Amino acid sequence: MFKRRARLLVASERPDGRAARVAELAAAAEFEDWIEVRPARAMCALTDDDLAWADLLVAVDTAAARAMPEHRPATCRPKYWRLPADTGAELDLQALEALRCMVGGMRMLARVDAEDA
């Protein structure tokens, strides 16, 4: 069983608002028991403290994925979500799909853990 919410640090190549929008979407009630999302200003602006906090470092564009710091702690796993370049309805739909997929997997694992107990 999960002892705390998974921590996602979301970043794009530059501060274009997409990471902040993902964090806003992740604040919905359907995710509150499962994940905590923080937007980063930009991938190049990450600090060691940011990386130590995160379970997943999520890049929302190809440039951010390429710029992911290699010195991440072993507990901070990289993820790449190919989100649209513009904020808007399509970004919201794809970000929500990615968040729901992640949380759905966590729910399945929690059920398996409960059945094994």
Image (tube, rainbow, N blue to C red):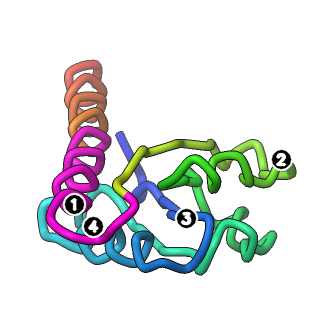
Mark 2 highlights which residue? 70
Q: Amino acid at mark 4?
A: Ala
Q: Nearer the observer, disc 4 or disc 1?
A: 4
* Residue 79 percent across, percent down from the top left: 54, 42
User: Which of pointers 1 and 2 lies earlier in the amino acid sequence?
Assistant: 1
User: Which of pointers 3 and 1 lies earlier in the amino acid sequence?
Assistant: 3
In the image, what residue occupies the spot 57% across and 47% down? 62
Marks 1 and 2, how far apart at CA: 29 Å
* Residue 23 percent across, percent down from the top left: 35, 72
Q: Amino acid at mark 1?
A: Phe
Check contact, mark 4 vs mark 1: CB within 8 A: yes
Marks 4 and 2, how far apart at CA: 26 Å
Q: Nearer the observer, disc 3 or disc 2?
A: 3
User: Which of pointers 4 and 1 lies earlier in the amino acid sequence?
Assistant: 4
Label 3: few (<14), some (14–19) or many (≥20) C-alpha neighbours in 10 Å: many
| Residue 95 belongs to magenta span | yes
Q: Nearer the viewer, residue 86 or 25?
A: 86
Q: Amino acid at mark 2?
A: Glu
Residue interval drawn in magenta: 85-102
